[in-house]
Structures are given as C-alpha cells and as structure tokens.
Amino acid sequence: MSHLPGLTPVPAAAMGIGALCVTMLGLPLVSVLLATLLLLSSGLVVMPLVIVSVVVAYVVRAWLPSVPPESPSEG
C-alpha cells in the first residue's frame, strides 16, 4: 500500500497490521491498539488511518461467507 500517492511506508505498515489482525482475530479494538503500540511514537499519528482500515477489514470479513472446514474423507 505504500505505493499509493501520498502514503508513506509507516502508515501503510500500520494499516496492514491493523487489517491483518482484525481479519485473523475478529477483535477490532485489539487490532487498533496492537498496530498503534507496535509503531511506538508514530502509532499515535497514524491511528485514524488504522481505525479506518480496521473498520473496512472488519466489515469485509463479516460480509464474506466463511468456508466450513473440510471433513476427512472416509475410505
């Protein structure tokens, strides 16, 4: 995402961390806090971007159907 116009690598990394965490964990608040804490002093500056990316990823995760696990084949 850092190749988007006006987006430097630090906000792109923060948005990626937040979106990945909320997709895997399903916990939006924890995902925002994790992305903010991992980037230390830059985390507070990019927090609004992280919140937007976490909300978008959470909505997409909720909208997409979940894939049921495959059962082992008998035979």
Image: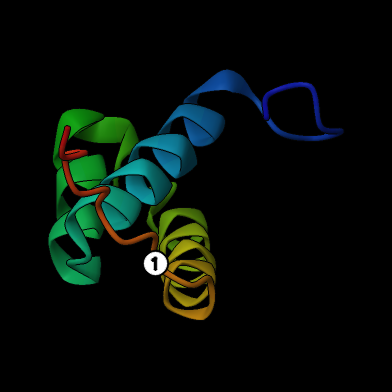
Point out residue 21 in the picture as x, y percentages from the top left corner.
26, 46
How many marks can you see? 1
Residue drawn at 25 percent across, 52 percent down: 69
Q: Secondary structure at mark 1?
A: loop
Q: Nearer the viewer, residue 73 or 43?
A: 73
Q: Is residue 58 above or below residue 31?
A: below
Query: Mark 1 sits on what residue?
Result: 66
Colour scheme of the picture: rainbow
How packed mark 1 is, by other alpha carbons closer than 10 Å (few <14, some 14-19, many 20 or more), is: few
- Classify residue 34 as left or right of residue 57: left
Look at 29% across and 57% down and name the residue there.
22
**Which residue is pictured at 79% across the width and 21% down the height?**
3
Q: Which quadrant of the structure image shows residue 23? A: bottom left
Q: Is residue 12 above or below residue 20?
A: above
Residue 8, percent across and down?
64, 25
Task: Choose between 41 and 55: the one closer to the eye.
Answer: 55
Q: Nearer the viewer, residue 23 or 49?
A: 23
Q: Quadrant of the C terminus?
A: top left
Note whether 45 is above or below 68 in the view shown: above
- Left or right: 44 in relation to 63: left
The residue at 48%/72% (across/down) is: 65
Q: Is residue 3 above or below residue 41?
A: above
* Residue 40 position by quadrant: top left
Q: What percent of the width, then of the height, locates residue 1?
A: 67, 30
Return the residue found at the far right.
5
Residue type indicated by callout 1? Ser
Q: Is residue 43 left or right of residue 49?
A: left
